[in-house]
Image (cartoon, rainbow, N blue to C red):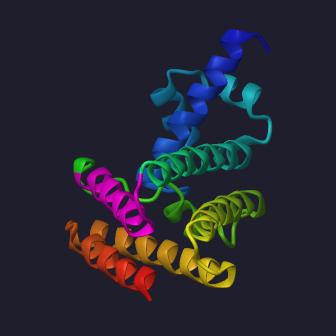
Amino acid sequence: MGEKGSVTKQRIIEVMAGLLEENGYEATGLSELGKEAETPKGSLYFHFPGGKEELTSLAILHSGEQLNEFFNLAFSKSESPTHAIKQVFSALEDRIVTSNYRKGCPIATTAMEAANQSIPVANACKEVYALWSKTIESYLTQNGYNPRVAKTLSVSILSLWEGALLLSKLQKSPEPLRMAQKTADLLLKT
């Protein structure tokens, strides 16, 4: 595959990632994807012979890596873990509010839908959540937290923001994210 093919493939993955975040796995069809990516349906199967499952898995991994890069950047620019986690919650709030509550976590909707339907997609979702949790855990350990405590905190903080994103999306309000961020602050201080 040449450079043009690689660019096309990456564009398809990025468009799929956006559609999955807004619509979920079931509501995202390949016809819609082809239209949004301005790519013929046959080209989708050329680039992704494993079909929707392969493409979804790659899109999930892409979204997960992008958000993980953001976490690392926020962590590197923060003076404390409390400040870093506040930055993450604030960015998630901005993301959901500016999308008029159409976006939230780029993984959650697909993870819930595909958990019992597609092993490759479920595995990609698990891989992303493990990556995020490990990133937070490593950051906390580097900042003086006991490794066991850091692991518990990373899962707790990840769970807080996933639940808060869902509630914010349903309520069309940033308030659940703000409340979850305050709870994360308390957890980090104990």
Residue at 36% x, 68% y is 165
Percent position (x, y) of residue 178?
A: 25, 72
In the image, 30 versus 165, the foreground residue is 165
Residue sticking out furthest to the bottom: 190
Asked if one can make out residue 28 in the rendered structure from this viewpoint, the answer is no
The magenta-colored residue range is 78-97
Percent position (x, y) of residue 112?
A: 56, 70
Residue at 27% x, 48% y is 99
Percent position (x, y) of residue 9?
A: 66, 25
In the image, 17 versus 36, the foreground residue is 17
Q: In this picture, is 98 found above or below 129?
A: above
29 relative position to 54: left or right: left
Q: Is residue 92 magenta?
A: yes
In the image, 96 versus 185, the foreground residue is 185
41 relative position to 45: left or right: left
90 relative position to 79: left or right: left
Q: Quadrant location of the N terminus?
A: top right
Provide the major secondary structure of the magenta segment. Answer: helix
Asked if one can make out residue 135 in the rendered structure from this viewpoint, the answer is yes
Residue at 30% x, 71% y is 177
Q: Quadrant location of the C terminus?
A: bottom left
Kindly indicate the quadrant of the structure image that contains residue 110. Answer: bottom right
Percent position (x, y) of residue 126?
A: 69, 65
